[in-house]
Image: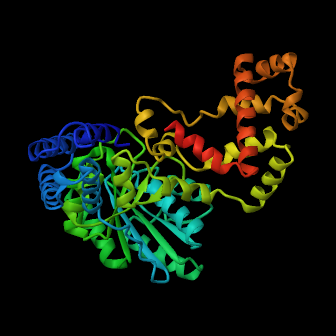
Amino acid sequence: MFDNLSDKLDKALHVLKGHGSITEVNVAETLKEVRRALIDADVNFKTAKEFTNRVKQKALGSDVLTTLQPGQLMVKIVKDELTELMGGDAAGINLSATPSIILMSGLQGSGKTTFSGKLANFLKTKKTKKPLLVACDVYRPAAIDQLHVVGDQIKVDVYSDRDEKNPVKIAQDGIAFAKANGHNVVIIDTAGRLAVDEAMMKEIADVHTAIQPQETLFVVDSMTGQDAVNTAKAFNDILNFDGVILTKLDGDTRGGAAISIKSVVDKPIKFIGTGEKMEAIDVFYPSRMADRILGMGDVVSLVERAQEQFDEEEARKLQKKIAKNQFGFDDFLKQIQQVKKMGNMKDLMGMIPGAGKMLKDVDIDDDAFKHIEAIIHSMTPGERENPSTINASRKKRIGKGSGTSVQQVNQLLKQFNQMSKMMKMMQGGGGRKMMQMMNQMK
């Protein structure tokens, strides 16, 4: 996500990070490169030009040229302006009514139906709501089936009427069903088309008028770049929607839609989709996204994801095992499962400051743990509990049983021993020493 843009912005700002003399001329030259990087990322030309003009005015007004660290100040100004360009603060979702009605809109293929499920799952697990999904796409043959599959997956009810062909009637009946069955949020999945057309716009406008939703959200595929922004404008002219959802931000997106959509339609990005799993949904924080674009990582989001998977009782048990030097491969396997629940691996690594740049050309597969899990599952319960018993013949058996080599088994055992020592050190009050070691490695 944003790899190319991050790389180009880093190169553009490199001269102002303490490498070479800082003058008004090379500030202007740097901002020219920044503008070029934004345009290459498919940001609207007018938006890119206005952005760099604002950065230049702030830079010269802040006496960047005379400060001791002009590069750092310039990066801060660029970061602040990027944050403002993408909306400033995170935008909430209106759930004030009972039931709160959320109307989903967008083009076909934007990921609208899948994201309807993700949003329902988010509201159910994070906001303790009881959502209902309503299938109003009467044109796409498998649309109703798809929504039912999604609903079953996240254990959320789905209302549909295969005999009714009027989306307005289905939406109204779905809301009535929600009221009768105690659902406090209704998410209405509407039909998409392959392009913006008059019939589609009239239909969704009719649904909007009939149900008067608290939230109308426009779902857009972020990989379509500037086309996404143009489509958003066309929808907004008809619906005056409340916010944008960007899907497929885990793909090879140039980032133009995320950066310029707010400035063009003046509506906030509320959520982003970061993978295929139902849990792959994040609230959009402009400041955090600006940090990631500038290669600063997103530690706050990483910690939040970790906390969501944190089990206090399990942590206490683990602490006792580490203290008694009883940490085994079964415990290690549990830790792997928790990390996997946090989301896409490359996305997680990109949240660590500096890691995104180092791993730019590295392909991190979501199944990166698969061979580790296979090796552990090939061990006997006794071996998992006491890894020191694993000798040469056992390594050979484990390697054969897991479809790996003895070298891979040895490598895992070595990594496991190193991690056990580190955890023991942290447990024994060596946290400060560890931090000192890490700082020396920077």
Q: Is residue 222 above or below residue 128?
A: above
Say which quarter of the image contains residue 183: bottom right
Q: Residue at x 43, y 70 (%)?
A: 170
**Residue 203 placement: quadrant:** bottom left
Q: Nearer the viewer, residue 52 or 268?
A: 52
**Residue 401 point in image, percent of width and height:** 79, 22
Nearer the observer, 421 or 40: 421
Colour setup of the view: rainbow
Using residue 216 as the reference point, say whether residue 141 is left or right of it: right
Give above or below for 402 relative to 360.
Answer: above
x then y, percent, for residue 427 = 75, 50
- Between 319 and 211, the one lying in front of the other is 319
Q: Position of residue 209 (x, y in %)?
A: 30, 77
* 281 displayed left or right of 248: right
Quadrant in the picture for the N terminus: top left
Res 423 seen here: yes
Task: State the count of labels.
Answer: 0
Say which quarter of the image contains residue 374: top right
- The picture places residue 69, in percent across and down from the top left corner, at 27, 50
Q: Taking 406 as reference, is 104 left or right? A: left
The residue under the point 20% across, 61% down is: 263
